Image (cartoon, rainbow, N blue to C red):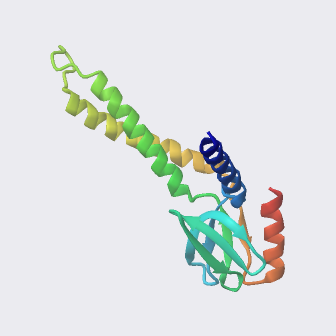
Amino acid sequence: MKNLIFVITLVLISNAYAQNGLENTNVFLRVYDLEGKKISKGKVLSILDTSLQLVRNGQPMEIPVRSIGSVKTKHSGGNNVLIGAVVGAGTMAVVGVATADPDAWILAYNAGEGAAAGALLGGTLGAMVGGITILFKNTNSYEINGDTAKWKAFTEMIVNN
């Protein structure tokens, strides 16, 4: 019985510690160097006075402030288009399979043809809807240019939002 209580306590303590270990993990950033080339992207792991730590695919990476030209929030517009296309294609492919009737008198098609046509039509419509949602995306851009004063202002804006 003591071992069971010990194990439960250990699990609860480790979960509490794990939840407090990372802050601001829901903020996605794209980081560009001083020449305007994208050097990294990912969710914020931590923001320090001299560097930015991001995590992408479970791998942490540290970017020194002196090499940061600009920072943009949120994913690029192509992400909206891609997600819209995938969701539209998948949904309409299922509808195409479900409505297939090879013995219909006017419009006869089998499940494979229905899936292909549905995916093509749904992917196109979904990409269009994803493209429209770009207009409502509120992406912010912050010019840093390796300046620590601008970096501190950016840090305060991110922490306060």
Label tally: 0
Viewer-nearest residue: 86 or 158:
158
Q: Position of residue 115 (x, y in %)?
A: 27, 33
Horizontal side of residue 60 vs 93, given as left or right: right
Horizontal side of residue 112 vs 46, given as left or right: left
In which quarter of the view is residue 72 placed? bottom right
Q: Position of residue 84 (x, y in %)?
A: 48, 44
Quadrant into which the N terminus falls = top right
Viewer-nearest residue: 54 or 17:
17
73 versus 6 height, above or below = below
For this orientation, the residue located farthest to the front is 1
In which quarter of the view is residue 2 placed? top right
Rendered residue at 53%/63% (across/down): 58
58 versus 26 height, above or below = below
Viewer-nearest residue: 40 or 117:
40
For this orientation, the residue located farthest to the left is 103
Rendered residue at 66%/58% (across/down): 25
34 versus 10 height, above or below = below
Quadrant into which the C terminus falls = bottom right
